[in-house]
């Protein structure tokens, strides 16, 4: 139940699917300071924005001074595109930034401007790589300045030891071997080092530097020259050590030859975020920052501080490095540098390291524009004019303490509160969610943090979101002047959310996303029992909701949001839905054996599935079933059963890739158990089976065809009902039945009736097509034909037995389609074919819905979400369990169902003591 997701986030959905599923699909109309506004039902809804544009609205939305600066720029017709000229505003920005950094950390920098954070990362990496290339040329010159020892050199003791260490001989070949050694050291591919959990952007190299442990961003597509180290001092130190070699040259010392060496580290930069942002808001301690600084300095590797999110005042100082006393070689800024209105980033490179030629080697159409620089200059002025740093520090500290207090009040749901200033993170604990299947599903697939954000937005008007690569951490990055009212609203909203989480109240959390607000938290269901002590075999059954109401059986707190709420929830969530094991229990046989059955649920309903059958979405749903089969494989199952529409979606299993797992639709036992229940009930109703007239609805389907075949052998007459468009198929099926009854079962009532009417001998289908045979019999016998076809359920009016197995989304059998007198209807369709009014308005009609069975020794069997009484299971699930009990390794009811398979499953059921449940049952599977 707690296995990790199969492959991280599944790419089968788009961002808009995800936003909609989680209630985050609002379109903001305007923003002002800490507030955003969207329209809902004609009114404007205000929202307190704590997401802060992923950290880029430190000045709030549309700060009047910044908006004013833009208006002023446009009014004086400032030049945006002045490429290839002296751009005085951007030059002023570079000088101002350089001065700010010098004032903050006492180091002088050259500043290069760019457009986005990722671009700043690319520029820093490229500059560092060019600097590395220059350093390598100097090192190559150093080693080439070597002396040539004589033919039989005498080495100093130190040199002999060094040669030994390098595995180089002391003879005349030593120089050549040393040259080869140096060549290899300098040819090592240069590497970058970054930190685990890091995020540096989404362009090619920035993504390489972004730690993507769970493949959330698609993993690293090719070989990457980035090494990731743990966020501790040993990680970087060890990595640098492993990538450091000696370069060696020869020197004459008196009468002997000596070696001179220098260390060469094939690393051209170490990227770090002083506070990791997207990785879950993790500040670096002063001690760690110092250790990293020293390790880099010792190996002459530039320390590149990515302050794109943490810089520009957000943490209460201009950059966070100030607070951890580090003066990096490179500082990257972005996000709030543009005042929340322009797109601009900056790379500050320590002056002594800056390559003078770089400005000729790098350019961008949009970078260094005076418009963005003008806004950034105004933003920098605002930092002082509004004492923004001090405000961020004070408000941040207060919020931090309040969040800590909240965490102390709710220690079971909040794991940690981290950050500095107004860059704070609240980490939710991973909970077992043993009373809420919905919350467990969302957590398992990494969506819970987003769903909680959806709740805060819809129920409390507070906008937050998880950090990009750590979905369990809520990021809080409000503007420096966030009002107290907003902070109070955030805290009270979080307080309520904590209570809902403690109660595992999925309805309360997800209800607001579908427009249903519930006032108080309600306890979820009692914990599920999950048994898994070893038994001989393990099988899996894949199912989905039959009706939207099933959601409330699956997760009881949903009962408060009603059927429409459940339907709306399924509609929103299903593009994100993934298979999960919800239940695992033993199924016992009357013979004493047992098998374990894992129930794998897919959160969509029959009606959603039916709607998808003739659309491109079918393929996506089929893939979902495929992933459920793979999950069954991971569980160690040898058999997998397909419930509900899973059979239809996969053409009765034939379109699956079972990878060695035996597949069954369970249709064999469904038909067998249904017929058995029908027979029992017919007996009780006084209907004599061999004299009864029967009808099969959906007679061309996989189940219907077999029902027709089995009934035809035993009843007096049979009507095959199917869609009008399939009349030819129906006629062919009728002819085939006529032929085989007369030829192979001459004692069957229908065969005898045919013989009495002069059809005692029928030529083979090779000589007369089955449909033609049917038409010939029909032509001669008219309404007395013992086998007939039709497209209308009212053809059932003269019959006493009806077996129904269409795949219609709605009921198709109504009271007016039935005759008077006792009738037994076996409805195997999902959803049911027989309208509920039949049982009400036709007191003589008995409806058996679905093949429902009972397994001996399992009186408490119950799978949450399946509408059956304790101890009951659907026959298709039971067939899966029977295959486990029998140790079957080959497919069961697979592809086209045959009467033989029905008989075979009935044999297994008898052997293991499974019995059909008779009586009126509400639903089918
Ligand atoms: N570095 C860090 C630390 C970031 O947080 C981000 C964005 N979240 C980036 C780089 C990339 O910035 P952008 O999205 O502007 O490319």
Image (spheres, rainbow, N blue to C red):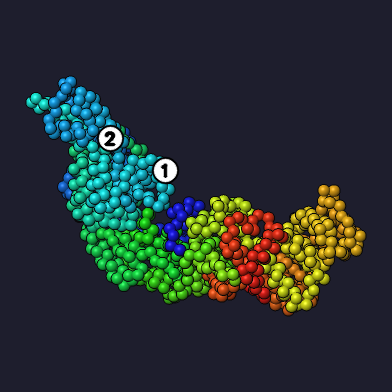
Is 364 rendered above or below residue 451?
above
Residue 345: give x, y in percent of width and height: 31, 46
Say which residue appears at 39% left-offset and 72% top-offset: 502
- In the shown orientation, is residue 739 left or right of residue 587? right
Q: Quadrant of the N terminus?
A: bottom left
- In the shown orientation, is residue 745 left or right of residue 430? right
Which residue is tagged 2? 130
- In the shown orientation, is residue 667 left or right of residue 444? right
Mark 1 / mark 2, whichever is N-terminal: 2
Say which residue appears at 37% left-offset and 45% top-offset: 207
Residue 259: give x, y in percent of width and height: 15, 30
* Nearest to the observer: residue 642 or residue 649: 642
Give the total of numbered labels.
2
Provide the secondary structure element on which disc 2 rests.
Answer: helix
* Nearest to the observer: residue 653 or residue 467: 653
- In the shown orientation, is residue 844 left or right of residue 57? right
Q: Quadrant of the C terminus?
A: bottom right
* Nearest to the observer: residue 87 or residue 438: 438
**Quick check: marks 1 and 2 in contact, CB under 8 Å?**
no
* Quadrant position of residue 433: bottom left
Q: CA distance from mark 1 to mark 2?
A: 24 Å
* Quadrant position of residue 607: bottom right
The numbered mark at residue 221 is 1
* Nearest to the observer: residue 369 or residue 808: 808
Residue 472: give x, y in percent of width and height: 37, 60
* Quadrant position of residue 720: bottom right
Provide the secondary structure element on which disc 1 rests.
Answer: loop
Say which residue appears at 22% left-offset and 29% top-offset: 169
Q: Residues within 10 Å of mark 2 (few under 14, many from 20)?
A: some
Residue projecting furthest to the left: 254
Say which residue appears at 24% left-offset and 50% top-offset: 234
Residue projecting furthest to the top: 151
């Amino acid at each position: 139940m707690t296995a990790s997701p199969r492959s991280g986030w599944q790419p089968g959905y788009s961002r808009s699917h995800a936003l909609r599923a989680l209630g985050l699909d609002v379109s903001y109309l305007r923003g002002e300071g800490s507030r955003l506004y969207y329209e809902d039902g004609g009114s404007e809804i205000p929202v307190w924005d704590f997401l802060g544009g992923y950290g880029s609205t430190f000045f709030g939305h549309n700060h009047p001074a910044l908006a004013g600066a833009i208006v002023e720029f446009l009014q004086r017709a400032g030049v945006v595109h002045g490429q290839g000229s002296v751009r005085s505003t951007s030059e002023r920005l570079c000088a101002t930034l350089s001065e700010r950094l010098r004032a903050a950390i006492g180091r002088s920098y050259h500043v290069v401007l760019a457009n986005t954070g990722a671009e700043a990362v690319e520029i820093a990496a490229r500059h560092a790589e060019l600097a590395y290339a220059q350093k390598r040329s100097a090192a190559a010159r150093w080693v080439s300045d070597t002396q040539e020892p004589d033919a039989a050199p005498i080495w100093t003791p130190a040199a002999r030891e060094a040669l030994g260490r390098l595995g180089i001989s002391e003879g005349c070949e030593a120089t050549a071997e040393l040259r080869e050694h140096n060549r290899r050291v300098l040819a090592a591919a240069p590497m970058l080092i970054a930190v685990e959990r890091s995020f540096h952007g989404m362009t090619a190299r920035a993504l390489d530097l972004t730690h993507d442990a769970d493949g959330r961003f698609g993993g690293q597509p090719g070989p990457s020259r980035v090494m990731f180290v743990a966020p501790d001092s040993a990680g970087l130190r060890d990595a640098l050590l492993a990538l450091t070699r000696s370069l060696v040259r020869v020197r004459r010392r008196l009468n002997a030859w000596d070696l001179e060496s220098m260390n060469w580290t094939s690393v051209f930069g170490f990227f770090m975020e002083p506070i990791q942002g997207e990785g879950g808001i993790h500040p670096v301690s002063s001690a760690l920052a110092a250790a990293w600084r020293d390790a880099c300095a010792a190996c002459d590797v530039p320390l590149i501080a990515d302050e794109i999110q943490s810089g520009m005042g957000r943490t209460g100082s201009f950059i966070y490095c100030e607070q951890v006393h580090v003066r990096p070689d490179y500082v990257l800024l972005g996000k709030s540098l543009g005042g929340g209105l322009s797109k601009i980033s900056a790379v500050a490179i320590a002056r002594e390291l800056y390559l003078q030629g770089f400005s000729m080697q790098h350019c961008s159409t949009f970078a260094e524009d005076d418009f963005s620089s003008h806004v950034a200059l105004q933003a920098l002025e605002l930092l002082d004019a509004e004492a923004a740093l001090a405000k961020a520090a004070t408000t941040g500290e207060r919020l931090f303490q309040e969040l800590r207090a909240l965490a102390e009040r709710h220690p079971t749901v909040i794991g940690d509160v981290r950050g500095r200033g107004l860059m704070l993170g609240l980490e939710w604990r991973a909970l077992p969610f043993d009373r809420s299947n919905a919350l467990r599903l969302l957590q398992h697939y990494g969506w819970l943090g987003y769903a909680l954000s959806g709740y805060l937005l819809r129920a409390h008007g507070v906008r937050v979101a998880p950090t990009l690569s750590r979905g369990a951490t809520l990021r809080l990055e409000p503007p420096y002047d966030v009002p107290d009212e907003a902070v109070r609203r955030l805290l009270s909203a979080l307080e309520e959310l904590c209570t809902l989480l403690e109660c595992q109240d999925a309805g309360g959390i997800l209800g607001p996303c579908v427009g249903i607000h519930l006032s108080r938290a309600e306890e979820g269901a009692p914990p599920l029992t999950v048994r898994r002590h070893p038994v001989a075999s393990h099988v899996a059954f894949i199912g989905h909701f039959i009706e939207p109401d099933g959601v409330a059986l699956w997760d009881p707190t949903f009962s408060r949001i009603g059927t429409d709420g459940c339907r709306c929830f399924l509609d929103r969530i299903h593009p994100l839905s993934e298979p999960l094991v919800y239940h695992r229990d033993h199924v016992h046989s009357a013979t004493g054996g047992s098998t374990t059955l894992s129930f794998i649920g897919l959160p969509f309903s029959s009606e959603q599935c039916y709607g998808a059958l003739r659309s491109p979405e079918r393929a996506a749903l089929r893939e979902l079933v495929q992933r459920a089969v793979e999950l069954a494989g991971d569980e160690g199952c040898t058999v997998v059963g397909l419930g509900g529409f899973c059979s239809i979606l996969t053409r009765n299993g034939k379109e699956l890739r079972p990878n060695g797992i035996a597949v069954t639709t369970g249709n064999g036992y469904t038909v067998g158990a249904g017929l058995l229940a029908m027979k029992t009930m017919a007996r009780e109703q006084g209907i004599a089976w061999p004299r009864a007239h029967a009808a099969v609805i959906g007679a061309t389907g996989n189940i219907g065809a077999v029902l027709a075949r089995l009934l035809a052998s035993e009843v007096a007459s049979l009507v095959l009902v199917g869609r009008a468009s399939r009349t030819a198929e129906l006629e062919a099926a009728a002819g085939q039945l006529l032929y085989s009854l007369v030829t192979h079962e001459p004692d069957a009532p229908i065969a005898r009736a045919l013989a009495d009417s002069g059809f005692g001998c029928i030529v083979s289908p090779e000589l007369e097509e089955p449909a033609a045979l049917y038409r010939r019999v029909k032509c001669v016998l008219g309404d007395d034909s013992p086998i007939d076809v039709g497209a209308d359920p009212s053809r059932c009016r003269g019959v006493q037995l009806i077996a129904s197995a269409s795949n219609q989304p709605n009921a198709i059998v109504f009271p007016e389609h039935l005759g008077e007198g006792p009738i037994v209807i076996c409805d195997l369709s999902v959803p049911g074919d027989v309208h509920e009014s039949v049982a009400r308005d036709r007191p003589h009609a008995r409806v058996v819905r679905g093949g429902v069975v009972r397994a001996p020794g399992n009186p408490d069997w119950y799978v949450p979400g399946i509408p059956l009484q304790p101890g009951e299971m659907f026959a298709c699930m039971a067939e899966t369990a029977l295959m486990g009990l029998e140790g079957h390794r080959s497919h069961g009811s697979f592809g086209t169902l045959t009467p033989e398979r029905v008989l075979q499953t009935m044999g297994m059921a008898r052997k293991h003591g499974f019995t059909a449940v008779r009586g009126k049952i509400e639903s089918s599977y």
